[in-house]
Amino acid sequence: MSVGWHRVAFRVLGPGGRACFSTSSRWRAPKPLAMDDFTCDLIRNFSIIAHIDHGKSTLADRLLELTGTIKKKEVGKNEQVLDKLKVERERGITVKAQTASMMHSFGGKQHVLNLIDTPGHVDFAWEVSRSLAACQGALLLVDASQGVQAQTISVFHIAQERGLKIIPVLNKIDLPAAQPERIAAQMQSTFGTDPTDIIQISAKTGRGVDQVLQAIVDRIPPPSGTTTGPLKAFLFDSMYDRYRGVISLVALQDGILKKGDRIASCHTKKKYEITDIGILNPEEIPVTSLHPGQVGYIACNMKESSEAHIGDTLYRVGAPVDPMPGFKPAKAMVYAGIFPIDTSDFPKLEESIKRLALTDRSVTIQRESSTALGQGCRLGFLGTLHMDDVSSSLFWVPYKIVYKDKEVYVSNPTEFPDAIDVSSKVKEVQEPVVKASIIVPEEYFGEMMDLCFTHRAEELEHKYLDAGTGTESRIMLTCVIPLSEIVTDFFDQLKSRSSGFASFDYEEAGYKPSNLAKVPSFPWYFFSMANLSMPLALVVHRSHEDAIGKLWVKKLVKVIPRQMFEVPIQAAVGKKIIARETLSAYRADVTAGLYGGHVERKMKASKEIGIDTLVLT
Ligand SMILES: Nc1nc2c(ncn2[C@@H]2O[C@H](COP(=O)(O)OP(=O)(O)OP(=O)(O)O)[C@@H](O)[C@H]2O)c(=O)[nH]1
C-alpha cells in the first residue's frame, strides 16, 4: 500500500481531545498527524506474548475495537483484523508485523498505546527479544484450558530478562474446559505470579478486556527519552513494500524524527533519507514527526530487507550515537542447498530465490556451484520454521571445525574435512546445540524421554508443572540436543508420539564437541554414471552412521536409473563401507522405465530422500 490517496476510516484524537482526523466518505490525501503533544507520560509500549493459538490476535482485535481504532465486529464473525491486514497487504507488501498504535482516553487525557508485535515462533527467539526491547511491558497471555506451554515459558523468560513489566492474563475463560484456578496456580508455581495480579478474560466475547486496557496504563511504566538528545531510533521490525522498498518500524529513544531527515545505521553505516514517516493505526497514517517514546514506521529508500537489521540503532547523519546494547546480526542456523532439475532453469530459480530474500530478511542466499549438481543456491534460515515451504535438499547446520591454529564454521558439506583424527590438523569438531523444553501430559513422558534419547539429548531434567494440585499432571522436560537432530523429523515425531499434546520450544545453546563423521563416498557409481566428479556428502554422528548409511543406499537404489549391468551402491566412511545395496541390471522390458511417469516416480522418490532437484536422467 502506498501512502497517498486512501480512504480515511479512522478517528484519531489528539491529546487535548481535538480531532486530527475524521471519518470521511471521500477519498483524500491524509493530512499528516501532529504527534508533538504525546509526551512520554502519555505513551505505553507493550507486546502480547503467548504460546501459539492462546489468543494473541483475538485479544489484539478486541483492544483495537475497545479503543475505537477499528469498528466493532459481531462476535462469532471475528475475522482477525491484524491477520486480515496481512493478507490484504500481501499484494504490495509482505507484512509480518502486526504492530498498531491505539489512541485512548484515560483520566480525561488521550494516551497512545503502542501494541508491538512479536514473532510467534520459536525460531525467532532472538527477534522476540529485539521487539520486546521496544516495549516497557508485556501481556503474558495463557489459555485457561491449556495452561502454560513451552513457548509461554520461553517468552516469559525473554520478557523477564528485558526487565519488562509483565501483566498475566488468563484467556478463554468462556470455554467449558477452562480451569482458571488451576492454571493460575500453575502460573504461580512456574513464574512466581501473584494470582491476584492475573486478569481473567475472554478475548472472544470481550469479557474483562477493559481491565486489560486499564492495566496497560496503570501497571506498565511509560518510556523515557528526551527531545533534546541526539537522534536515536531503535529499529525493531521491518516489512517490504514493492514500491517503497523496506519499511522499518522504529521506537524513538531520543530526538525528533521528520520526513527529509538524513539518517544512518550504526551497524552498516549506510545513509538514508526519510521519505515517509507515520504510525500504524493499524493502517499507515503519516505524521509530521515522531517524538521520544513513540513508535512508528519510516520509509527511507532502503532497497533490500537484509539492510534493515533488527535491533540496529539509527542516528542523524553527522551526529553518531552509541548503538543500543546487545545487537548482533541475525545468523542463519540451518542451511539447505537448492539446485534446479534442469540446469538451464538456474536463472529462474535464482531470480525467485532473490525475490524471496528481498522481502524476507531471515533468509540469506549464496550462489553455489557444484560439479555434481551444477549451479545452485545455498539458503540460510534462522531456524526450522522457515524451511516448511522448501522441499529441498539436505538440511545442514553450521559445524565448527577447531584446527590447531584457528576455528572455522562450515555451512557446506564440501568444506567439511574428510578425515578427523588427532593426527590431522583438526583438533575437534563441534556442532550447534539447543536447549529444548517439552511440556507433555505425564502419560507421554516415557515416549518423550525415548524421543530425546534417540536424538542424542543430554542433560535431561524434568519437573511437574502442577505439583501439589492433585490433578492430572503435566511434565516439563528440558534437555540439550544437537540442532541437527531437530531440523529433520523431530517435530513430526514429537506430535505423533504425544498424540499432539506436546509443546516444544528451543533456544540456542552454543556449540559442543561431537563425534562426527563425513560420509563422502556416496555411491561412487551414482556419480560416475551422472558423469560427476564431486560426491554428495553427509555429516553424521558416529552413533548414527550405520543406520543413515543403510537408509540412504536403500533409498538411492529406488531412485537411480537401472543400467545394462549391475550397480553396487554403497556408503562409506573413510575406507570402511558402512552400507551396500545392488541395483540390478535391466531385464527385457528395459525401455518401459524410461517414459515420463517413471521419471516422475523417480523424482518423487528422490524428493523423499531430499534431493528433489537433482538431475537423475
Ligand atoms: N472460546 C474462546 N476462543 C478463543 C478466545 N480467544 C481466542 N480464541 C480462539 O482461539 C483460536 C486462536 O486464537 P488466535 O487469536 O488466532 O490465537 P493466536 O495466539 O493469535 O495464534 P497464533 O497467531 O497462531 O499465535 C481462534 O480460533 C480464536 O477464535 C476466547 O477467549 N475464547
Image (spheres, rainbow, N blue to C red):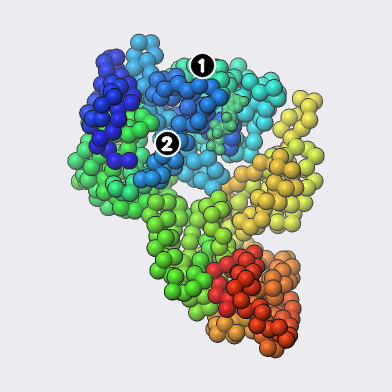
Q: Quadrant of the N terminus?
A: top left
Image-quadrant location for residue 104: top left
Q: Residues within 10 Å of mark 1 (few under 14, many from 20)?
A: few
Question: Residue 504: where, in percent of width, then height?
Answer: 64, 44
Image-quadrant location for residue 66: top left
Taking the view exactly as shown, the residue that stands out farthest to the bottom is 565
Q: Is residue 229 above or below residue 598?
A: above
Rendered residue at 57%/47% (across/down): 507
Q: Is residue 202 above or below residue 602?
A: above
Earlier in the chain: of badge 1 and badge 2, it is 2
Q: How many marks are shown on the rendered structure?
A: 2
The answer to whether the residue bearing label 2 lies less than 8 angstroms from the nearest atom of ligand 1 is no
Q: Amino acid at mark 2?
A: Leu
Say whether residue 561 is left or right of residue 27. Answer: right
Q: For numbered disc 2, what is the local secondary structure?
A: helix
Q: Amino acid at mark 1?
A: Gln
Ligand 1's image quarter is top right
Rendered residue at 66%/41% (across/down): 503
Give whichever of 475, 194 is nearer the camera: 475
Q: Is residue 550 visible?
A: yes
Marks 1/2: CA–CA distance: 26 Å
Question: Residue 55: where, in percent of width, then height?
Answer: 56, 30
Say whether residue 276 is left or right of residue 54. Answer: left
Rendered residue at 45%/31% (across/down): 81
Q: For numbered disc 1, what is the local secondary structure?
A: helix
Question: Residue 284: where, in percent of width, then height?
Answer: 32, 34
Give whichever of 569, 446 is nearer the camera: 569
The answer to whether the residue bearing label 1 lies less than 8 angstroms from the nearest atom of ligand 1 is no
Which residue position holds label 2? 85
Q: Is residue 107 above or below residue 331?
A: above
Which residue position holds label 1? 211
